[in-house]
Amino acid sequence: MTFSSKGYAAWLPSDRWQDEQRIEAWRPLLEQIDARMELRAAGPGAAALQELANGIEILTGTPPSLTLKAGSPPVIVLGSPQAAQRSLEELKALPLAEEAYALRIGAASENENQDGEQAAYAILRGGSERGLLYGAFALLRLIDSDPRGPRDLDLAESPRNPLRMIDQWDNMDGSVERGYSGGSIFYRDNRILLESPRIDDYARLLASVGINAISVNNVNVHREETKLITSALLPDVRRLSDTFGRYGIQLFLSVNYAAPIELGELDTADPLNTDVQHWWQRKVAEIYAAVPDFGGFVVKADSENRPGPFTYGRDHADGANLLADALAPHGGLVMWRCFVYDCHQDWRDRSTDRARAAYDHFRDLDGRFRDNVVLQIKNGPMDFQVREPVSPLFGAMPRTNQVMEFQIAQEYTGQQRDICFLVPQWKKSLDFDTLLNGAGCTVKQIAAGKVHPFTRSGVAAVSNIGNDDNWTGHHLAQANLFGFGRLAWNPELESDAIAEEWSALTFGADTPVARFVAKLLLESWPVYESYTAPLGVGWMVQPHYHYAVDVDGYEYSKWGTYHFADRDGLGVDRTLATGTGYTGQYADENRDRYDSLEECPDELLLFFHHVPYTHVLKSGKTVIQHIYDSRFEGADAVDRWIARWRELEADVDPERFAHILHRLEGQSENAKQWRDAVNTYFYRKSGIPDERERTVYA
Amino acid sequence: MTFSSKGYAAWLPSDRWQDEQRIEAWRPLLEQIDARMELRAAGPGAAALQELANGIEILTGTPPSLTLKAGSPPVIVLGSPQAAQRSLEELKALPLAEEAYALRIGAASENENQDGEQAAYAILRGGSERGLLYGAFALLRLIDSDPRGPRDLDLAESPRNPLRMIDQWDNMDGSVERGYSGGSIFYRDNRILLESPRIDDYARLLASVGINAISVNNVNVHREETKLITSALLPDVRRLSDTFGRYGIQLFLSVNYAAPIELGELDTADPLNTDVQHWWQRKVAEIYAAVPDFGGFVVKADSENRPGPFTYGRDHADGANLLADALAPHGGLVMWRCFVYDCHQDWRDRSTDRARAAYDHFRDLDGRFRDNVVLQIKNGPMDFQVREPVSPLFGAMPRTNQVMEFQIAQEYTGQQRDICFLVPQWKKSLDFDTLLNGAGCTVKQIAAGKVHPFTRSGVAAVSNIGNDDNWTGHHLAQANLFGFGRLAWNPELESDAIAEEWSALTFGADTPVARFVAKLLLESWPVYESYTAPLGVGWMVQPHYHYAVDVDGYEYSKWGTYHFADRDGLGVDRTLATGTGYTGQYADENRDRYDSLEECPDELLLFFHHVPYTHVLKSGKTVIQHIYDSRFEGADAVDRWIARWRELEADVDPERFAHILHRLEGQSENAKQWRDAVNTYFYRKSGIPDERERTVYA
């Protein structure tokens, strides 16, 4: 079975610890499990118990003994029940939110039994079965990432973001749009792969980092996928929903706005037409009859040639509310994507600015959306580039639920061939202070629903998995899926903590490989940025493929994606005074900072300004010299990684050693191609040589 | 049946003439057919008779009466047998080559019968049944393209090129590589579509313009196509061979050089290995047992990642001779493609020149190839660009059979969305004087086998048809398939004669539409060139797609396809003195002309020289001004075509009017995108404004 290959288990327990002392140290805590909860075979509580028992057996080689009794709230006690007794009563009395868990470990020597043996215990209590499941995975992480043995701990956690969602861009033909890890684990030949054990294991992976919602088909809903909401396929959707439901994950479907037409039942999809309204009401009732735990719809409408309310002269509020009204009686949500822009733009027209589009389309609709509509807003105003400012729409609609959308799939960030650990990039967005209600209105506070009175909010992200043995193509790309979940749960976690935790779980706690991998991950986004498009300008990639360098690839296109490089300079003037006025979409203080050539951060300079090659950055370098220097530095960094990785050959299994080496060598080649193509491009245009006289090809 | 749509019949008779006088004028000649030949139902003679009878019935509305007797040589007499008697004896005595035909028409008033009625006749004699078939189609063309009625004629024709071949790039999954007219007519779902009536009709179309060989699968032979030479599929190949054989067309297959390995029978494909030699001998014997009229193999080896003899340290002569030796006992040929170059070139290395590759790989192998090997050499040294010099390899191997390969499929010339009538481009190649044996060694003479003692030679071309109703996507792209056949038959035909003949057959003889279409076709290659890549430099297209403009799309690629534009100038220095030395592959006089900045033709200037934007062309314009002027002129020309086409609405059926208008509008948009992207690109680089102050976007 290929699934036994290294990497399939990802960050979940996969191998018995090599260190017998470590096993001995943990044994008192891990040899006995005593669970008290209501018994539901298909519930997250049972999953929690199973994950703990299996995980412990894998890590220690010994299955724990298990007792299970009815009880509420759901509690799991590991180790000595006697020693745990007092803490157990305290924890049961603790007020906990539904998704929260409390975890107390008593490991110190005061916990001795009558025979003077150490009487360690751990108590896990959930605010619900789901909370218990999150706690179980947290406990497994703790056990597997710290080699030192049990230590006292008293912890209560609940997720900051109510919605923590994953969007699959899987198509029923088995392909994955922007997928870099093989085909779909969900579909093949236009049917749902119910027999796939991978779907179960994917649910486990997602739940282990706290994901609580998933949309299982591509937002570009083509003909076959439109049929997912028909009676022929709903029984299969139900089985998917049950699979994810067992892990506390609610199932959503992306729907085709023109479904009433495409399914041949109406000749309009006008949201104000009563036939259309009734059609969706009946359709949603049918869905909920078949799939009682259904979460709702994800909708990409009037975007990149998808149908939508614009066809009928209606706006996005009309469009979203149509579906929201149908879903409301059943408690369902509409995730309405704000990725709406003119994808037939004319590059000759410098006044139109795609960056403005989401705000211009949606901002004035604030207050018009139903309470069960959630606007899904990409983190930046363009499209998941290596570097973008935060979307000014996020937080700018106080009366409208919002989630921020990230892309775990590395479409523009190396496609899981090059390493690019995106947690620091996401944190940059989450930490951004919008200043919309004064200081402290950070994206993470808005997403958590702490700034505006959102009824539903949080974060969503496009998945990066496929049916490759290791899920993500590149082994190290697993860190992004892990990191998204951890950050969605708690955006205050630091990037290095996440990188270290993932590396320890994946390559062994406190190993040289884990230490190096964590360091490499933390360097990887700056490195990827340094050899690709400079200073926030973006888009210097081959059209459609989005991996290889093509500096002018999107320059004369209809996609609204330009750098305007000429023989004198480059960048996009988005200022209020002389540019597209995009900066005016931010709060005044942010606007002024971006507008100012002096105050605009270097990293976003070319996103906001058109400057000469000789413009001097805050770093003291000219733009052209920065371009040269950073391209060389980026490519050199990859070669340093390779050298270090080769030194670690004896410390890692041959399969992952070879795989990662091979990918790193590909990344090195890619980095050099970027370096030289970008440098030559700008040298040919500017005529300015590299001060340091390195090789810039003519 | 969609095949009844306009365009399916292409240039063959499709509609009854509207002009009753025309029908009356032809009636004496067309009401009676008297044929004398050996009777073979599946032979070209029977096809000739059937085509004539059907064609006459379609055009006049009346089926001719038919008599058929055994006789040799094969002869068909139309009209009055009495009047034809003397001529018939003369023609029967005429010495004719196998593929030749003689045609005599007696229409003048001296041919009166006893009643004073006009006793017109036409006599068609073939050098063989195939010659007769070519003559039958020639007679139909004559009848249908001249509205004035029968006139005296005495004609004997034989084809100049022994091999007149079509290469299908069809894959068994039903796709067509570089196909712009729908899917394959030959394959679907990895099987041969024997039931397709289109295959028969395609054979008719090809025979009607004198094609005598076809290779029915893509030169990139993938897994499924490798199986075409296995016992499971050979019966189906036989049926294809019979279909084409009835129209005098010999069937070839593209084969995978690694077939012995891929079919799981050997672990090597080394041409000097005796197991491999025996394998191919047995395989070829098996093929001929199943397909007695089989023509031979087409091979793309060691090219663009295809396997070949290089894998085993052998050269192309070793590789080709392996197959040639296996085919020789059965009279089969190896068409060995010379499209061999390094497709992992490094753009940073300016000394390597892809244009040199075919000559460098093959030239020194002259004399080493078997007599039944034919080298298939692309017309230019790069790859079917809008403008290239002639491949210097053609004619440079006096002891090796060669065919020149053209591409009817408009891969780089508008993809059958934009109009580009390629006959003038092909004539430019065919008329090129290589000067290899002194003056007069034109490509067409070499291809015809008149210069070197070739045993087999001629021309081949990549087909442009698919399963679109009208075969070629764009109605007007049919003219290229027609034109290739006509030119392969007789390279002395003028472009305007071919354009006019095709237009008359397709849109009616002597109609305003036919006149305009002929004019448009003749303008179309210069127009396409004038808005795309300037002065022979090529390759300014989107990678992989090859349609839309992307000036730098191939500039930093591994494909060996560069223009080297910087802020001062552009072009590729291929001179002997300062460049790659490619010019040294030509005969001295041609080399000197290309080497000289003064004498090099403007149209190829940037293919051979890197010049400043301010370099003055023979036209008196600077290079940059030429770029601006020609881009504007090209786009304007398309708009003039549209204006004229709109005026012709009443003169053409609505289906073709709308289709062509729609495509022209698309071409106009494409032309403007090219115009503006190229102009802006060079304005941004050079900083030199348009002298005439037209709009060049900044």
Image (spheres, coloured by chain):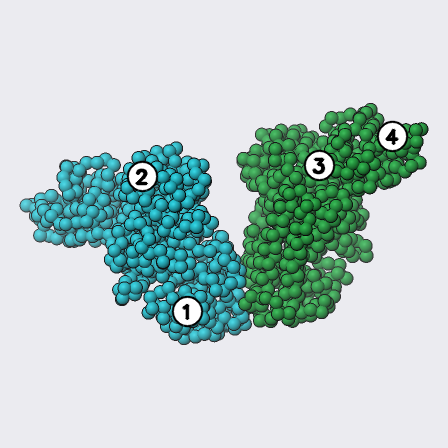
Chain colours: A green, B cyan
Q: Chain of mark 4?
A: A
Q: Identify which residue is drawn at 56% across, 38% down.
A: A174
Q: Chain of mark 2?
A: B
Could you tell me which secondary element the residue under label 3 belongs to?
Answer: loop
Measure how far apart labels 4 and 1 are at the Cα level: 88 Å
Q: Nearer the viewer, mark 4 or mark 2?
A: 4
Q: Nearer the viewer, mark 1 or mark 2?
A: 1
Q: Mark 1 belongs to which amino acid? A: Leu
Q: Which mark is residue B241?
A: 2
| Residue A671 at x, y percent in the picture | 61, 57
| Residue B660 at x, y percent in the picture | 40, 52
| Closer to us: A352 or A21 | A21
In this view of the protein, can residue A581 be seen by the observer? no
Measure how far apart labels 4 and 2 are at the Cα level: 83 Å
Could you tell me which secondary element the residue under label 2 belongs to?
Answer: helix
| Residue B283 at x, y percent in the picture | 36, 38
Q: Left or right? Give the position of B497 relative to A211.
A: left
Q: Chain of mark 1?
A: B
Asked if the residues shown at circle 4 and circle 1 are in contact, with their CB atoms under 8 angstroms apart, the answer is: no
Asked if labels 3 and 2 share a chain, the reply is no
Q: Identify which residue is drawn at 19% across, 44% down.
A: B128
Which residue bears the numbered disc 4? A80
Which residue bears the numbered disc 3? A14
